[in-house]
Image: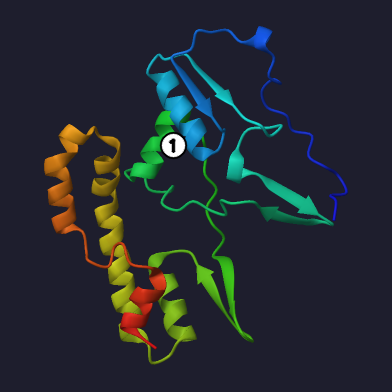
Amino acid sequence: MSSPKPSTIRVGNRYRAKRLNGPYDAIVIGSGIGGLTTAACLSKLGKKVVVFEQHYTAGGFTHSYDRNGYEWDVGVHYIGDMGVEHTLGKRLFDHITDGQLKWAPLADRYDRIFLGDRYVDLVAGPEAFKAELKQAFPGEEQAIDTYLTYLRQVAKAMPGLVVGKVLPDLATGPLRKIVNRAAPDFLNKPTREVLESLTS
């Protein structure tokens, strides 16, 4: 089904060899979140960067499209932890955009999961989220508390894991040992497996 009004947003220029202004320090293939983040960080370090993208506009999975009055996100639906200044993600976005990117808060009820003929709303805020789950799944309070504790442990372990991935191998050896010791054993398990260990 085609969109009644296709997007006309165009970012960048069509590739033409004569338009290139090299030499470049870095060539980034793909303008998704990772490609644009990499290009922005390299540029902020004083590197001359070019980004190539086959689509008519940059953004990758940050795009949205509409059909018959409805709008869909292609990939990213929402990004958490942007209202707190000290998180790694917020600091990275502030670095890349020089603090110019402004974030809109999620709606109180920002998503809905359908389970057969039932549904569960996902609500903003950790305490409200916990209360909503406990109301939707009576008798599962212990499993919910444990799972949310697991989520906090994973969130706490993530900065060390990320740093361990981006540093050169020589520097990550000792760090990786510390991070692996501190990381919970369920960190790399599928969500379903973790949930099945807590509840039926």
Give the residue type at disc 1: Phe
Residue 176 horizontal/vertical position (percent): 17, 46
Quick one: label 1, few (<14), some, or many (20+) residues within 10 Å? some
- The residue shown at (26%, 56%) is 156
Quadrant where the C terminus is found in the figure: bottom left
Please state which of residues 8 and 124 is positioned toward the viewer in this rendering.
Answer: 8
Q: Is residue 200 visible to the viewer in this orientation of the structure? A: yes
Residue that label 1 marks: 93
Seen from this angle, which residue lies furthest bottom? Answer: 139
Report the side of 158 relative to 12 (left or right): left
- The residue shown at (65%, 44%) is 63
Q: Is residue 98 visible to the viewer in this orientation of the structure? A: no
Residue 85 horizontal/vertical position (percent): 36, 43
Please state which of residues 183 and 5 is positioned toward the viewer in this rendering.
Answer: 183
Report the side of 89 relative to 152 (left or right): right
Q: Is residue 3 above or below residue 185?
A: above
